[in-house]
Image (cartoon, rainbow, N blue to C red):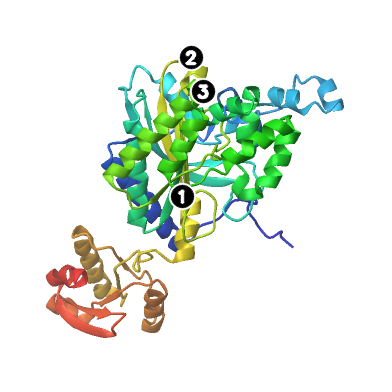
């Protein structure tokens, strides 16, 4: 008996109806990207591991999908590595490429590689899948789409303000109520200085970024496990519990970090971004979260994370500023800032809240019944004429019983069925049946498009 086919865990198939919903998301995001002046690029699904490794922190490197070299990938491998199970060294010998983990690092590589062909500041958007060897769970997949927008070649905070406006516009169009959380990597560096652990900056950010998921007690345990002293962990607690409005939190942070040049600069950057954004108006809630770190080592300034207010799921958009990313590819001194929409999580939110347009699943607006012979030829001519007018339509391919053809139209949610029988073909007319109302009318072919448009 043949084995039942399956797909890898953490991946999904999408039916035509599901693809209609996904394309609604992609088209909405793409239209806003273009509205804000961004230009589309694409990069390969796989990159050299030398491009990807070391850019996402220790945990990120573990989640990279690595691709075995072609042919006999064990040729030339030191047998001792197999016997001693030195997997890290072994991997470098049998794998030179990996699937991209995100779109930001490949974008930085793109900028360096094509530096002579692009105009700075460069505003790009990219909508492509990424892969992570993560444990599949609700809202977390091994293959998923990201929709990124970045500005590179400018250190102006106007870019952050614009990106927050862009986020607000996308979710306004999708009708998802959101909260935008902000922090700044410089603030986190200042906090590390304040608690006497500047050398533990990465350990602190990786741990505190999990507060929403595991709680403060588990975070404190991890901080101790990562080598922070009990005194440092104790000093961190009141900082993580700062409350009040964003303006009040900024004032408290400013007082706490007044002796840290880096921390004070981070507070000032946050104040500029928040004040400028609020002055323009925002449908979304805007909040300051000093525990927000996003766990990625390449952020150097503003950090952005978006949560849905009416649906329990992880972040649905995130991003931030990365001043040093292109430097690792031999192009130092280029500042960038970007955001990434998690299309798959947005898809789950829209499904959960039932926020899709009612007519989204319709592919054809009208189906012509196939009567065979001369009537079929007349229907084909009518189909071509309607398509020329922008009406999506189809002819049922087989001369089947009327009941079967009508059942197909009904199951496919096609709103109109058109009939061209012998009398209609002779008169140059079409009988148009409204499937929802159950009514039908006979009219000239030239008037069908207008009737369908309502």
Is the C-beta separation of discs 2 and 3 under 8 Å?
no
Between marks 1 and 2, how big is the CA–CA gap? Answer: 32 Å
Is tag 1's residue or tag 2's residue first in the polypeptide sequence? 2
Q: Determine whether the residue tagged by mark 3 lies in a helix, strand or loop.
A: loop
Q: Nearer the viewer, residue 256 or 307?
A: 256
For the point 43% across and 66% down, which residue is it?
354
Q: Residue 343: which disc?
A: 1
Q: Residue 259: which disc?
A: 3
Q: Residue 269: which disc?
A: none
State the image coordinates of residue 426 (x, y, percent, origin top left): 15, 78
Side (left or right) of 329 relative to 446:
right
Crowding near pointer 1: few (<14 within 10 Å), some, many (20+)?
Answer: many
* On screen, residue 381 above or below 74: below
Between marks 2 and 3, how big is the CA–CA gap? Answer: 34 Å
- The part of the image, by quadrant, that contains residue 48 is top right
Crowding near pointer 3: few (<14 within 10 Å), some, many (20+)?
Answer: few
Is the C-beta separation of discs 3 and 1 under 8 Å?
no
Q: Residue 330: which disc?
A: 2
For the point 70% across and 46% down, which residue is it?
217
């Amino acid at each position: 008996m043949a084995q039942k086919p399956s797909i890898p865990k953490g991946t999904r198939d999408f039916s035509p109806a599901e693809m209609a919903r996904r394309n609604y998301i992609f088209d909405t995001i793409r239209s806003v990207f273009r509205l804000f002046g961004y230009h589309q690029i694409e990069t390969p699904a796989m990159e050299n591991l030398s491009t990807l490794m070391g850019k996402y922190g220790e945990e990120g490197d573990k989640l990279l999908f690595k691709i075995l070299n072609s042919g006999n990938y064990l040729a030339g491998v030191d047998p001792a590595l197999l016997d001693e199970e030195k997997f890290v060294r072994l991997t470098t010998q049998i794998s030179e490429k990996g699937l991209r983990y995100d779109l930001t690092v490949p974008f930085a590589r793109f900028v360096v590689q094509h530096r002579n062909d692009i105009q700075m500041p460069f505003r790009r958007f990219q909508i492509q899948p990424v892969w992570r060897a993560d444990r599949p769970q609700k809202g977390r997949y091994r293959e998923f789409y990201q929709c990124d927008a970045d500005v590179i070649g400018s250190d102006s905070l106007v870019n952050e303000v614009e990106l927050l406006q862009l986020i607000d516009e996308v979710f306004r169009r999708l009708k998802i109520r959101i909260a935008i959380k902000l922090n700044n990597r410089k603030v986190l560096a200042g906090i590390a200085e304040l608690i006497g652990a500047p050398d533990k900056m990465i350990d602190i950010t990786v741990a505190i970024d999990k507060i929403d998921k595991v709680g403060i007690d588990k975070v404190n345990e991890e901080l101790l496990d990562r080598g922070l002293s009990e005194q440092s962990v104790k000093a961190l607690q009141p900082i993580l519990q700062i409350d009040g409005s964003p303006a009040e939190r900024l004032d408290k942070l400013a007082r706490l970090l007044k002796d840290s040049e880096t921390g004070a600069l981070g507070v000032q950057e946050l104040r500029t971004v928040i004040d400028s954004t609020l002055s323009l108006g925002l449908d979304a809630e805007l909040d300051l979260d000093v525990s927000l770190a996003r766990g990625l080592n390449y952020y150097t300034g503003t950090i952005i994370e978006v949560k849905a207010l009416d649906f329990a799921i992880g972040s649905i958009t995130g991003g931030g500023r990365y001043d040093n990313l292109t430097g690792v590819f031999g192009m130092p001194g280029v500042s960038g800032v970007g955001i990434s929409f998690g299309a798959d999580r947005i898809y789950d939110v829209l499904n959960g809240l039932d926020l899709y347009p009612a007519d989204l699943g319709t592919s054809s607006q009208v189906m012509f019944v196939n009567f065979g012979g001369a009537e079929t030829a007349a229907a084909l001519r009518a189909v071509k004429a309607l398509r020329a007018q922008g009406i999506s339509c189809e002819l049922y391919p087989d001369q089947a019983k009327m009941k079967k053809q009508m059942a197909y139209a009904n199951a496919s949610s096609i709103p109109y069925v058109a009939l061209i029988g012998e009398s209609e073909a002779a008169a140059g007319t079409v009988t148009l049946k409204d499937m929802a109302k159950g009514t039908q009318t006979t009219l000239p072919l030239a008037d069908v498009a207008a009737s369908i448009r309502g």
